[in-house]
Image (cartoon, helix red, strand yellow):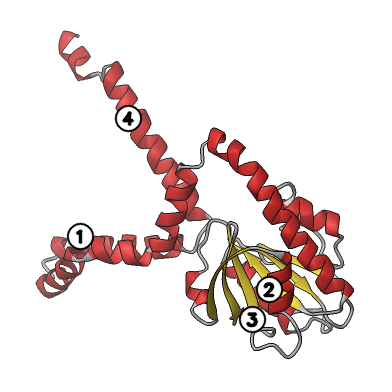
């Protein structure tokens, strides 16, 4: 009986197990909402292939995979760079820090809402993608890099007709416009509503690949639409835009009506 008790974990061991399990849970939960989970599955397949190759003495395959794993850590850092940066950013966003950032976030939200309102009133088409957890760096490479604070005047000017950047999308990260004139991927799924233009299809395409919130202003109808998680909500109000930007009802768009 005493020998069995020696193998039971103590309070400190249980605490360490709890911390490690919580860390794994947090990482897996975070990756599950990003495209990185697909890459993680691919790495697990390679690991299983390596163990099978070792088991049945497939020396060439095992040697190639060993060489691949030697640089795996560096490759993982490069591949998962956007996700790692987003995870560390979220880790540092304690409640106290968020409390002090609320005023600044509200200012950014109001600037975005004002820009959308002015674009709709002037019948100027525009598409703005607000980054959340999944980075938009790879999409920013297709446009013109801009490092400027979010402002209604700047956003409206970027979409001004006949301007060099008016046809593309604007990417926003936090309180910063990171790129303009960006080319977004069009949705790969059939769209029942044939009245949807290129901007709406691009908004759907980006929302299918990332967790960004995308706002679209139609130059034909002045209607405002929002795309999130592969769903498009059309003819939304400025109040809805404001609430969604503030994080109040973004998730409802993923199950809301397309119309």
Cα separation, mark 2 vs mark 1, equals 42 Å
In percent of width and height, residue 18 lies at 37, 29
Q: Which label is found at residue 186?
A: 3
Horizontal placement of 84 versus 47: left or right? right
In the image, farthest residue toward the bottom: 162
Q: Are marks 1 and 3 in contact (CB under 8 Å)?
A: no
- The residue drawn where x is 78% and y is 58% is 241
Against 175, residue 118 (above or below) is below
Mark 2 or mark 4, earlier in chain: 4
Q: SS at mark 3?
A: loop
In the rendered image, which residue does mark 4 sit on? 17
In percent of width and height, residue 213 lies at 67, 62
Cα separation, mark 2 vs mark 3, equals 7 Å
In the rendered image, which residue does mark 2 sit on? 203
Cα separation, mark 1 vs mark 3, equals 40 Å
Q: SS at mark 1?
A: helix
Q: Are marks 2 and 4 in contact (CB under 8 Å)?
A: no
Mark 1 or mark 4, earlier in chain: 4
Picture quarter with the N terminus: top left
Mark 3 or mark 4, earlier in chain: 4
Q: Are marks 1 and 4 in contact (CB under 8 Å)?
A: no
Between marks 1 and 4 in the image, the one whose residue lies nearer the viewer: 4
Q: Residues within 10 Å of mark 1 (few under 14, many from 20)?
A: some
Mark 2 or mark 3, earlier in chain: 3
In the rendered image, which residue does mark 1 sit on? 51
Asked if residue 28 shows in the view, the reply is yes
């Amino acid at each position: 009986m005493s020998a069995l008790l020696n193998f039971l974990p103590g309070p400190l061991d249980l605490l360490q197990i709890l911390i490690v399990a919580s860390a794994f849970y947090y990482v897996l939960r975070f990756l599950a909402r990003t495209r990185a989970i697909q890459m993680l599955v691919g790495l697990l397949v390679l690991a299983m292939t390596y163990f099978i190759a070792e088991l049945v003495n497939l020396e060439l395959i095992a040697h190639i995979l060993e060489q691949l794993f030697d640089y795996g850590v560096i490759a993982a850092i490069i591949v998962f760079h956007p996700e790692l940066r987003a995870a560390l950013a979220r880790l540092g966003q304690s409640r106290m820090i968020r409390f002090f950032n609320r005023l600044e976030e509200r200012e950014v939200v109001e600037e975005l809402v004002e820009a959308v309102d002015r674009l709709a009133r002037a019948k100027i088409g525009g598409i703005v993608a607000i980054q959340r957890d999944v980075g938009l760096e790879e999409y920013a490479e297709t446009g013109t890099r801009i490092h400027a604070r979010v402002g209604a005047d700047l956003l409206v000017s970027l979409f001004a007709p006949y301007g060099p950047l008016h046809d593309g999308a604007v990417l926003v990260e936090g309180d910063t416009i990171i790129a303009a004139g960006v080319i977004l991927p069009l949705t790969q799924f059939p769209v029942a509503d044939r009245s949807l233009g290129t901007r709406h299809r691009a908004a759907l395409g980006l929302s299918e690949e990332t967790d960004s919130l995308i706002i679209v202003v139609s130059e034909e109808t002045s209607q405002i639409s929002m795309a999130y998680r592969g769903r498009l909500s059309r003819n939304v109000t400025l109040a809805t835009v404001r609430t969604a930007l503030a994080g109040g009802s973004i998730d409802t768009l993923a199950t809301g009506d397309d119309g």
